[in-house]
Image (spheres, helix red, strand yellow):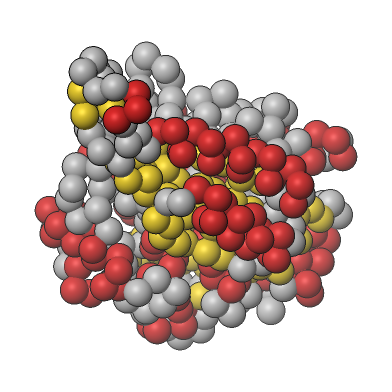
Amino acid sequence: MWGAIEHLGRDGRTRGYLRDAWSPADLELRRWFGQEAARRGLDLREDRNGNLWAWWGDPSARPGVVTGSHLDSVRQGGAFDGPLGVVSAFAALDLLRAGDFRPARPVGIACFTDEEGARFGVPCVGSRLLTGILDPDRARALKDDEGDSLAEVLRAAGRDPGALGRDEETLRHIGVFVELHVEQGQDLVHRDARVGVASAIWPHGRWRFDFHGQANHAGTTRLADRDDPMLPFARTVLHARQAAERNGVLATFGKTRVSPNNANAVPGLVSAWLDARGGDEDAVRALVDELTDFSGAEVTVESWTPVVDFDAVLRERVAAAAGGAPVLPTGAGHDAGILASAGVPSAMVFVRNPTGISHSPEEHADAADCHAGVAALAAVVEDLCGS
Ligand SMILES: [Zn+2]
């Protein structure tokens, strides 16, 4: 399975992945998901929000045990973030079927749409729409860098943007959701463990800072006459680092859009995206308030996810089924966190990442650790199917 997808959406120069939602690479990955479902005789469904579900058994008869993740990537991302969870879900099912596994409830494999938000700016669009956390009108109006709205992109992909929104029928099918994911840190390295289980997801969000100025000629406009938005932006980036250290949280400006984006022009507009997260919600909010005041920019909240504590009973059960795996918190958002915050019993299994690097072509997990992840996931699914 890994060999079938590792070339899709890969930048031959950097070896990084470009798997924007609904891009040709993403559509190719979705087709691959359908083929893997068909090969196993699973019933493939696409819900109203573009999420894919491959069912063994009928979930309308009884809610199922669902596992999976996403196939889209951040721009110049790694191979594992997302696909490891989907491939491991199919592999865990194969492992269970190779034995005499007869599940007492349906088993589903999920592929959530647009988890990373690389194209439209909002992460976990598929699970946020499914649960009703994201307003469908707002989703339809989201625009990519080309100026195309999500509604237009969906229509071009043969989907009905009018169908977006909370999907009670699909939600009723999910009895419990377990997402396997490559660890985005080195906790498991320090604990000398191949797999772990998530305790909680930190509160996190994205804010767009628009710094307005006056575009003008870089050669003929005197310094004194300039209204250059790059300067308050630069001051804000430096201030964000200091404020983050003071507040004990993380703050990152990782994406900017400069207009007109000419080497010989004073910019007229700098838009920059702040990603802020931390263990303490009040500290994250205080940081964003401080930066909003300091920057003088027009600030728009693009997403906000409060702290998500995974169900404690389920978490302990998953940890036990996974062979006594350690329990750790994470600073990264996931579809499992969105489902958990909407009241769907959810858990996460992490696979060790030797360098901790993620959202980069350097992202890695050793094959032996991936196999341990599949074995743990199979044990978890088997345990959850027993009741
Ligand atoms: Zn991911």
Residue extending farthest front: 224
Q: How many marks?
A: 0
Q: Quadrant of residue 336?
A: bottom right
Quarter of the figure that contains the N terminus: top left
182 versus 218 height, above or below: below
361 versus 209 height, above or below: above
Task: Tell me what residue is drawn at x 17 percent, y 67 percent.
Answer: 160
- Is 90 positioned to the left or the right of 193 in the image? left
Nearer-the-camera pick, 72 or 123 = 123
Q: Is residue 69 visible?
A: no
Q: Measuring from the top left, give residue 108's x and y in whole percent.
A: 48, 65
Q: Measuring from the top left, give residue 35's x and y in whole percent.
A: 32, 48
Nearer-the-camera pick, 36 or 75 = 75
Q: Quadrant of residue 5?
A: top left
Task: Tell me what residue is drawn at x 37 percent, y 45 percent.
Answer: 211
148 versus 151 height, above or below: above
Task: Tell me what residue is drawn at x 81 percent, y 55 percent.
Answer: 327
Q: Measuring from the top left, give residue 40's x and y in whole percent.
A: 41, 53
Quarter of the figure that contains the C terminus: bottom right
Task: Tell me what residue is drawn at x 35 percent, y 34 percent.
Answer: 228
- Is 48 positioned to the left or the right of 60 in the image? left
Q: Is residue 281 visible?
A: yes
Nearer-the-camera pick, 115 or 254 = 254
- Is 212 positioned to the left or the right of 380 in the image? left
- Is 250 positioned to the left or the right of 29 in the image? right
Q: Measuring from the top left, give residue 27's x and y in whole percent.
A: 26, 45
